[in-house]
Amino acid sequence: MSSKTQWLSGLYYADFISFYSPTQLCGGGTTKSNSNE
């Protein structure tokens, strides 16, 4: 259960960051933002 929670948390965090400031965090750790741009 803990593993799933952490996985979901990471996904949500990455999405939040990418949606909020993908340009400011250019390559801050999420590859999604980079792929989208």
Image (cartoon, grey):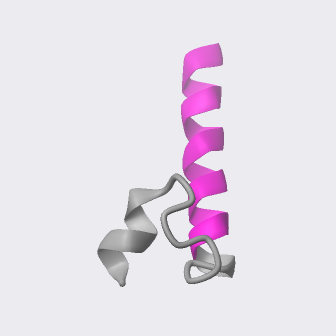
Examine the image and state in which quarter residue 25 appears.
bottom right
Task: Pick whichever, 5 or 30, lies toward us.
Answer: 30
Report the magenta residues as a range: 1-18
Q: Quadrant of the C terminus?
A: bottom left
Is residue 1 shown to the viewer in this render? Answer: no
User: How many marks overall?
Assistant: 0
Does 15 lie within the magenta span? yes
Examine the image and state in which quarter residue 15 appears.
bottom right
Question: Measured from the top left, where is residue 13 in percent x and y?
Answer: 66, 53
Is residue 37 shown to the viewer in this render? Answer: yes
Q: Quadrant of the N terminus?
A: top right
Work out whether 33 lies above or below 31: below
Question: Measured from the top left, where is residue 7 in percent x and y?
Answer: 54, 33
Residue at the image position 62 percent from the left and 53 percent from the top: 12
Question: Measured from the top left, where is residue 27 in percent x and y?
Answer: 48, 64
Work out whether 5 lies above or below 15: above
Task: Pick whichever, 28 or 12, lies toward us.
Answer: 28
Residue at the image position 63 percent from the left and 29 percent from the top: 6
Chief secondary structure of the magenta span? helix
Residue at the image position 56 percent from the left and 83 percent from the top: 23
Question: Measured from the top left, where is residue 16 in percent x and y?
Answer: 66, 66
In the picture as drawn, the residue positioned furthest to the left comes out as: 35
Does 25 lie within the magenta span? no
Residue at the image position 30 percent from the left and 71 percent from the top: 35
The answer to whether 24 appears left or right of 34 in the picture is right
